[in-house]
Image: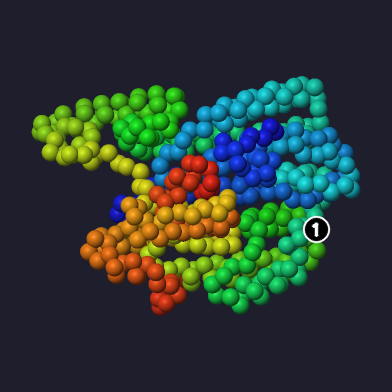
Amino acid sequence: MASNSEAGGSADYETLMSTSDVELLKRAWRNEKAAPEILQYEGALVDRAKEQIELVEETIEDYVENGIDPLVVSLYQMDLDRAQFLLRSYLRVRLLKIEKFMFHNLKSEEAERRLSEQEKVFATRCADDLAKHFEETVLLKLPENYQSVLKQSLISEVDDMVPQPHLDTFVVCRSKNFVSLNLYEEGESPETVEMERGDLYFIRYKIVKRAIESGQIDLI
Amino acid sequence: MAGQTDPHISLFSPQEVEFMAEDELVEIVPNMNMEQLNFISGDFGRFIPQIPTKVPLWLAVALKRRGKCTFRPPEWMSVDNLTQILEAERESQSTFQALPFSYVEIARLLFDHARDDIPDMYMVRSLVEDIRDVRLHKLETNLGSFQGTSAVKISNVSAMEVNIVRPFVIRALEAFYKHDKPEADVDRDTRSSRQQREANNEPRRPLRQR
């Protein structure tokens, strides 16, 4: 259907031509699944996809009523199922990640920016419920210094009871263009890895994080 | 391993890998008339008897199962081409031949649904299986030889193969990275020289038998 160019504006001619919403959704789904932390919510994409799905659902109902060839109807249904699966799985993966890193997401501003409005509501409610549950069942019965949900004890300086996404894990990625990345942080022996277009790499997530956000690299 | 992250989110099941492969375009020859299909994923058609057209794999399989078309096997799936690839794979210990990213899934779907459309089907199938075996074996032996780096290049490995080795490689690389890091402060010079050594110089450690 309608193709959407990437926000970068300098996308290849081919990517411009072939990037349907389903392709974009597939890419978002794949990236989300492969990344250890939650990624930016693709609000516009999800809304567009929802619209198209609803439109096709109505069309299918019309077709069935008008007695259009059942083969054609079943093919449209299949395409609809595929699109729905992508959308649902994308949202579900995000929910899973929110649940897993509940307190972290609410604490870190960067992570919070990446949630949609509904996800934020869900996350706050979830976190409140969980905190309340912990407090009532366990925490209030512990000695005073240990009653916080977020810290092991009042002596801890950081919130060490909060599980953080494991950013040092490795992911498989492929780059769309030639990209040169800094391998080590903070200027330790600045080795770079250079990726040609289409090469596959196992690489540490932290290194490619920026490139994924800007759309230069895809996770596989 | 203690501290293992939840594997469920980030691993793709084979069905999901196949799902992604099903969007690849293949050529079919329809035997009936049908109007253009305006899908969410794109527009395909019109379908005119005997005129070949390109459609996504899932659509092609659906049409084939209802007897509405025949497949045109992709060019890389000829006996000659596959024999060449198999020999090249066997010769080289460390590089992989260029194959379509989803060749495993495409071949599997074609074998399951379109046997009669592939000339020399049995030959082609056994060639593809041999190629898969050789490549997988190569992957396994190569896995034993890299040491701790932050990036490992794997060219021409296909989607299914990546998915199979992904869990092991990720955990191995993580372990390497974790054990390398504390030594960084102790002795920076030795560490950076170690990183630059070629992976091939390490003696190959045999992997566990499966």
> The N terminus of chain A is located in which quarter?
top right
Of residue B138 and residue A78, the one placed in the foreground of this image is B138
Res B172 quadrant in image: bottom left
In this rendering, is residue B56 above or below A68? below
The residue tagged with tag 1: helix, strand or loop?
helix
Residue A105, x across and y down, in percent: 35, 34
- Seen at 60% across and 28% down, the residue is A48
In this rendering, is residue B203 above or below A147? below
Judging from the image, mark 1 belongs to the subunit labelled B
Tell me if I can see residue B207 in this picture. no
- Seen at 61% across and 66% down, the residue is B132
- Seen at 27% across and 39% down, the residue is A162
- Within 10 Å of disc 1 (Cα), the crowding (few <14, some 14-19, many 20+) is few
Residue B151, x across and y down, in percent: 44, 60
Left or right, A144 with reference to B104: left
In this rendering, is residue B163 above or below A43? below
Of residue B55 and residue A136, the one placed in the foreground of this image is B55
Res B186 quadrant in image: bottom left
Residue B141, x across and y down, in percent: 48, 72
Q: Which scheme is used to colour this image of the protein? A: rainbow
Number of numbered markers: 1
Tell me if I can see residue A101 in this picture. yes
Could you tell me the amino acid type at mark 1? Asp
Residue B174, x across and y down, in percent: 37, 57
Of residue A15 and residue A202, the one placed in the foreground of this image is A15
Q: Which residue is mark 1?
A: B116
Left or right, B87 with reference to B93: right
- Seen at 11% across and 34% down, the residue is A145
